[in-house]
């Protein structure tokens, strides 16, 4: 320890200097990508172009399906010019990235054409995106749509609620060639009836697709099923209930570090609270741990992704209480998950959210409808805090009186003592211990008071 270091007591009775490493949580400045009512927002990362692509329904342009390219620099994001991918009204858009073809795929329901299901291939170049010709994957009514890429099979899978077939949950495999996409035969994964909402993710360890959905034919229970792509077809294992209560919101992500699937949902059996559960895929089956609450609010909007830099699952949500947008950071351990206290990225009306991790920037982009700003489509960069520190809310005891080597006997100036080994302090100001051991005028996390300065070099210790 150096003279003047802030000091903690360890569990074994020894003392150490306060230390920490990593980066603090960062939220950039919000940027508008569409100056009109924007809904059904969905984002994906294009690893070839190293850009984020956002698809949405443009309420300011006849509800046309539209997409825009975002570039992350530090904690800032800039957007290219929005591009209409279909000059028809849409009811939903979902986006996936085919890393083999190096193309974006947007699946959507075409309101103008009797709500038929379509998909279209997009190519990112710089800050622009261009599109091929739409292809039909469902010629009947199709409102709920999801798209995901299977990296092992090198195929896109589209899951949807087939209203033309008793609203059964159905999936189809898509193959990209150039700027076109073609489809295999449809396969039903839920024959119970209505299936909505639907979310899907690729488990790279198991090399399987996992679909999470509300099974409206089974009391709207939260349900998941494992899919195996072979050629242009997909087969499914047995569906497993992960929430035996009504569920209306769901999102899913894959934790590549823990090699687990994480599903977030609103738990109708617990006041609609935001809840997450860890799933383990084995063969064509999936099993689950116990659900963990990440937000004690009734969730109205929900999206999640995995941050490979922080090795954490990020869940964004909003609730009826002013619809403030918040991020909860989840850490998977075994078959469970724990969460940080959610932090707000937008303090008021936040809807139609999507979060996507930018692997090049090592940060995530949150896209949302900003109800405080005429429902404009808006994006903001988010970086979770990765600080690791030995400081807790209780273990600070004082300031080192001199420099000491490891295993030496040390004198620590405790509460009421005056330490004279500081510099740059302002007399009369209260100082807080920072997680890296320094002193600061604002509280860090945890909030620990170091003491009050009596001169530029002296501080009265508060332990």
Image (cartoon, rainbow, N blue to C red):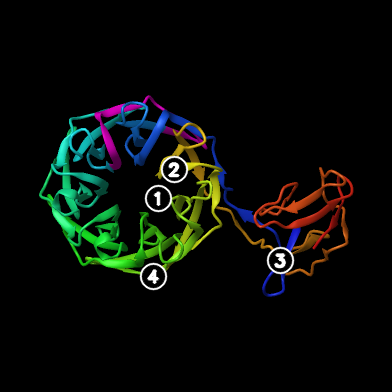
Drawn side of residue 392 relative to residue 91, left or right? right
Q: How many marks are shown on the rendered structure? A: 4
* Residue wearing tag 1: 305
- Label 3 – label 4 distance at C-alpha: 33 Å
Q: Secondary structure at mark 4?
A: loop
Q: Quadrant of the N terminus?
A: bottom right
- Label 4 – label 1 distance at C-alpha: 19 Å
* Residue wearing tag 3: 395
Q: Which mark is residue 351?
A: 2
Q: Quadrant of residue 99?
A: top left
Does the image show residue 19?
A: yes
- Residue 80 shown in magenta: yes
Q: Which mark is residue 252?
A: none
Badge 1 crowding class, 10 Å Cα cut-off, few under 14, some 14 to 19, many 20 or more, is many
Q: The magenta stretch spans which residues?
A: 71-96
Please give the name of the residue rendered at 27% of the width and 58% of the height, measured from the top-left corner: 210
Q: Quadrant of residue 66?
A: top left
Could you tell which of marks 3 and 4 lies nearer the N-terminus? 4
* Residue wearing tag 4: 289
- Label 2 – label 3 distance at C-alpha: 41 Å
Badge 2 crowding class, 10 Å Cα cut-off, few under 14, some 14 to 19, many 20 or more, is many
Could you tell which of marks 2 and 1 lies nearer the N-terminus? 1
- Residue 276 shown in magenta: no
Whether tag 2 and tag 1 are in contact, CB under 8 A, the answer is no
């Amino acid at each position: 320890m150096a003279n003047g270091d802030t000091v903690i007591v360890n569990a074994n009775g020894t003392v150490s200097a306060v230390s920490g490493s990593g980066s603090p949580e960062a939220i950039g400045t919000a940027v508008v990508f569409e100056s009109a009512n924007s809904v059904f927002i969905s984002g994906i990362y294009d690893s070839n172009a190293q850009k984020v692509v956002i698809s949405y329904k443009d309420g300011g342009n006849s509800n046309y399906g539209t997409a825009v390219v975002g570039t992350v620099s530090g904690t800032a994001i800039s957007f290219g010019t929005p591009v209409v991918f279909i000059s028809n009204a849409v009811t939903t858009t979902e986006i996936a990235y085919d890393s083999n073809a190096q193309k974006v795929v947007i699946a959507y329901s075409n309101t103008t054409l009797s709500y038929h299901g379509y998909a279209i291939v997009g190519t990112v170049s710089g800050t622009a995106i261009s599109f091929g010709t739409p292809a039909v994957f469902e010629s009947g009514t199709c409102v709920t749509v999801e798209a995901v890429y299977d990296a092992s099979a090198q195929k896109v899978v589209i899951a949807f609620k087939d209203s033309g077939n008793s609203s059964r949950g159905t999936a189809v495999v898509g193959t990209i060639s150039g700027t076109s996409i073609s489809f295999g035969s449809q396969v039903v994964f839920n024959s119970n009836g209505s299936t909505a909402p639907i979310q899907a993710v690729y488990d790279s360890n198991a090399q399987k697709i996992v679909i999470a959905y509300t099974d409206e034919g089974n009391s709207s229970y939260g349900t998941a099923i494992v899919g195996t792509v072979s050629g242009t077809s997909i087969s499914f294992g047995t569906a497993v209930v992960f929430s035996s209560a009504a569920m209306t919101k769901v999102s899913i992500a894959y934790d590549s570090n823990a090699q687990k699937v994480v599903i977030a949902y609103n738990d109708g059996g617990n006041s609609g609270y935001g809840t997450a559960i860890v799933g383990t895929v084995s063969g064509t089956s999936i099993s689950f741990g116990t659900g963990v609450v990440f937000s004690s609010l009734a969730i109205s909007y929900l999206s999640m992704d995995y941050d490979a830099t922080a090795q954490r699952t990020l869940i964004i949500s909003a609730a009826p209480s002013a619809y403030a947008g918040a991020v909860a950071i989840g850490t998977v351990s075994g078959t469970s998950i724990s969460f940080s206290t959610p932090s707000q990225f937008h303090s008021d009306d936040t809807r139609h959210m999507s979060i996507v991790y930018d692997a090049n920037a090592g940060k995530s982009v949150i896209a949302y409808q900003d109800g405080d700003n005429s429902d404009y489509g808006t994006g903001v960069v988010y970086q979770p805090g990765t600080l690791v520190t030995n400081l807790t809310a209780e273990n600070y005891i004082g300031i080192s009186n001199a420099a000491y080597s490891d295993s030496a006997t040390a004198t620590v100036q405790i509460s009421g003592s005056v330490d004279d080994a500081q510099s740059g302090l302002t007399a009369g100001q209260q100082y807080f211990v920072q997680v890296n051991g320094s002193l600061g005028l604002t509280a860090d996390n945890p909030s620990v008071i170091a003491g009050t300065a009596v001169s530029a070099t002296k501080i009265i210790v508060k332990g």
